[in-house]
């Protein structure tokens, strides 16, 4: 749908009037009083879909505005058309788009509290890719230098201990926060991948931190008995984030932070980053069957043409053979790996198709270990790092298969 058609559809869906406090309808309203613009009942849901399509029509606008801000500006710009029940013309839409793009793009520094870390050398900020970390008391003045505002107007509540910063280019504050929060979510997942194994020893979080807490249960029986239970849950140790381990080049961690924070990735680097994120999700997942599936998805992202593909026997062969060729160093190793992956995928099929919940921790660790080993090889092998598309990956695997050489 063109932007002009989407806007005129929104105009047609709109109704004018005072629907405030009406409990007999479902309504999305803009403004108050008799000139309020409303989308009512089924039209409200059609409006939501249409405004989303309009928002996605221009990649630059989508990258620099939030949907909520875009919606507000669109309704304001075309409100007269809605009031007069008049369709917009192409020149009206062009003016609207030009107005959006005339707003200057700015670079915002977005900071959030980060929990579960320590810096052994807090005098200088730490860099991981384009993420920057600060010990607040040591770096407070440097952070405050980023604005001309009086420091007493900057901070509220208790002082943070550590901060993480992401710089985002946007046209307004809310979009900068949205972009930064996506980057912070990615940081948490990549860090879990780098840590290497699911563990309760550490918990590093920006948006998803749970912390140390007690789990309590109170039990009352029909016979009048009372009991209770209490157990501690959560990580107590902090991670020394400036330890050289986290940027180890031989393990591929430095490259992982690079692709996690770099723009302009090629198609295969995007797949690799997505696989890292799925491994991070797998390591954070509490339910064994869900953790198992997420580690399997990491392999599927790497080895399948379509990320939405159903796992057919031919696709399973692609995945198991790809794993064997990348990780195996001999014919016997490759045959063993291929067989192991196929057995693990029989468990995946049982989870998806029959609701099997009897997935053991060792099953999860096996699938996770294979997924992580494949990603590690992709991060460290110069041959594999040069791949820029799934087609090039299959060309390499095919030549490896028939040559018998180790990658």
Image (cartoon, rainbow, N blue to C red):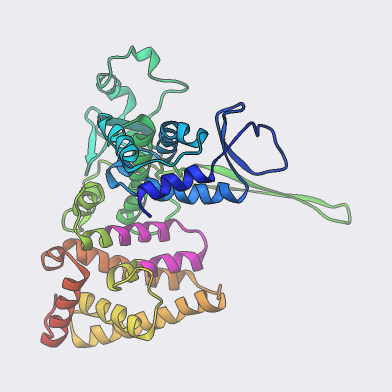
Task: Give the quadrant of residue 269.
Answer: bottom left
Q: How many labels sit on residues? A: 0
Q: Is residue 56 visible?
A: no
Residue range of the region highlighted in magenta in the rendering: 273-297
Q: Residue 176 or 72: which is nearer the viewer? A: 72
Q: Is residue 389 visible?
A: yes
Quadrant placement of the C terminus: bottom left
Where 278 falls versus 208 (above or below)? Answer: below
| Residue at 66% over, 32% down | 20
| Residue at 37% over, 47% down | 4
Where 241 falls versus 280 (above or below)? Answer: above
In-image side of 404 versus 136 (left or right): left
| Residue at 45% over, 64% down | 291
Q: Residue 348 or 388: which is nearer the viewer? A: 388
| Residue 102 spot, x, y in % from top left | 26, 31
Quadrant placement of the N terminus: bottom left
Q: Is residue 117 magenta?
A: no
| Residue 273 spot, x, y in % from top left | 28, 57
| Residue 330 spot, x, y in % from top left | 18, 84
């Amino acid at each position: 749908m063109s932007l002009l058609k989407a806007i005129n559809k929104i105009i047609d869906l709109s109704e004018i009037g005072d629907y405030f406090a009406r409990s007999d309808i479902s309504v999305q309203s803009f403004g108050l009083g008799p000139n309020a613009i409303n989308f009512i009942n089924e039209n409200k849901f059609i409006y939501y879909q249409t405004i989303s399509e309009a928002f996605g029509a221009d990649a630059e606008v989508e990258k620099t505005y939030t949907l909520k801000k875009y919606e507000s500006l669109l309704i304001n710009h075309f409100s007269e058309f809605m009031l007069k029940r008049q369709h917009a013309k192409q020149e009206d839409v062009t003016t609207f788009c030009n107005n959006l793009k005339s707003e200057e793009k700015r670079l915002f520094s977005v900071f959030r509290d980060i929990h579960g870390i320590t810096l052994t050398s807090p005098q200088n900020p730490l860099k991981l890719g384009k993420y920057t970390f600060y010990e607040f008391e040591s770096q407070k003045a440097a952070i405050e230098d980023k604005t001309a505002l009086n420091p007493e107007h900057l901070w509220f509540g208790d002082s943070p201990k550590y901060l993480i910063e992401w710089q985002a280019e946007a046209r307004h504050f809310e979009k900068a926060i949205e972009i930064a929060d996506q980057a912070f979510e990615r940081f948490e997942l990549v860090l879990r991948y780098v840590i290497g194994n699911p563990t309760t020893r550490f918990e590093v979080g920006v948006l998803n931190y749970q912390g140390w807490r007690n789990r309590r249960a109170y039990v009352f029986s029909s016979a009048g008995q009372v009991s209770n239970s209490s157990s501690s849950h959560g990580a107590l140790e902090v991670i020394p984030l400036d330890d050289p381990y986290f940027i180890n080049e031989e393990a591929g961690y430095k490259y992982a932070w690079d692709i996690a924070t770099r723009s302009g990735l090629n198609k295969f680097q995007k797949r690799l980053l997505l696989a890292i994120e799925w491994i991070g999700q797998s390591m954070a997942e509490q339910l064994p069957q869900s953790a198992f599936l997420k580690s399997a998805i990491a392999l599927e992202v790497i080895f399948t043409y379509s990320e939405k593909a159903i796992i057919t026997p031919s696709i399973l062969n692609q995945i198991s053979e790809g794993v064997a060729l990348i990780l195996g160093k001999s014919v016997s190793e490759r045959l063993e790996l291929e067989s192991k992956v196929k057995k693990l995928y029989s468990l995946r099929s049982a989870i998806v198709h029959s609701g099997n919940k009897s997935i053991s921790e060792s099953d999860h660790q096996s699938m996770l270990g294979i997924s992580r080993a494949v990603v590690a090889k992709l991060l460290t092998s110069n041959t594999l790092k040069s791949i820029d598309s799934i087609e090039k990956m299959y060309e390499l695997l095919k030549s490896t298969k028939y040559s018998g050489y180790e990658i």
